[in-house]
Amino acid sequence: MAERQGQAARDAVMGRIGQVVMLHHGGDREEARDRFLGLWAEIGEDGDPLHRCTVAHYMADTQDDPTDELAWDLRALSAAEELSDERLAGDDGALAVRAFFPSLHLNLAADYVKLGRSEAARSHLSRARGTAGALGDDGYGDGIRTAIARLERRLAETPMNSPPEPGPPEGPGGETLGPPRRRS
């Protein structure tokens, strides 16, 4: 009985996270940022790694400063490293932990590009490519693989640790540097 109650509480938190994600995708970035901060404070630094990973992953998208975005993406990676496949088995989709890493490393690579740290970007991009085999053969997996290839092409044209380019942190044609985010 207690185990089911614990699972229900975890599912409720994931539901609340999903609501904030929808708010953000609806265009209310500032309100989403405030709500994610509230969830982060509630979950705590030692809270459930899946909750911390998810909140930090999406919180990064609400940041205006690339350094803040990097800090949140690093938090997401750190929390993901604490996850186990058993923890995910109880949540919808029963994802494997290893399927998180291509996106998380791709996010970090994009962050480092924005900050003009191409060597660090290449390192995380290599990790993203090395873990991409865990992705499904679906639209999300295809999107991550496409984003990896796009960022690899961009970095191939960039000297090591060159200053960031002026303008918005987007690639040619307006696409963002990072991966597509899985919608909750």
Image (cartoon, helix red, strand yellow):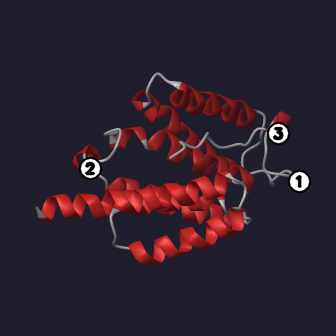
- What is the CA distance from the residue labelled 1 to the residue labelled 2? 40 Å
From the top left corner, tell me how far across and down residue 93 is, in percent: 35, 38
| N-term-proximal mark, 3 vs 2 | 2
Find disc 1 in the rendering and name its residue. 166
- What is the CA distance from the residue labelled 3 to the residue labelled 2? 36 Å
Q: Image height check: is 145 above or below 42? A: above
Task: Tell which tag, 3 or 1, sits nearer the viewer.
Answer: 3
- What is the CA distance from the residue labelled 3 to the residue labelled 1? 14 Å
- Residue 9: quadrant of the picture: bottom left
Find disc 3 in the rendering and name its residue. 174
Residue at 22%, 63% in the rendered image: 6
Residue at 63%, 58% in the rendered image: 23
Q: Secondary structure at mark 3?
A: helix
| 5 sits to left or right of 50 | left
In the image, what residue type sits under mark 3?
Answer: Gly
Residue 44 seen in the figure? no
Residue 171 seen in the figure? yes
| N-term-proximal mark, 3 vs 1 | 1
Report the residue that reaches farthest toward the left. 1
Find disc 2 in the rendering and name its residue. 84
In the image, what residue type sits under mark 2?
Answer: Ser
Q: For label 2, count other residues whose C-alpha is less than 10 Å away and answer few (under 14), some (14-19) or many (20+).
A: some
- Residue 64: quadrant of the picture: bottom right
From the top left corner, tell me how far across and down residue 10 is, in percent: 31, 61
Residue at 78%, 50% in the rendered image: 169
From the top left corner, tell me how far across and down residue 25 is, in percent: 66, 51
In the image, what residue type sits under mark 1?
Answer: Pro
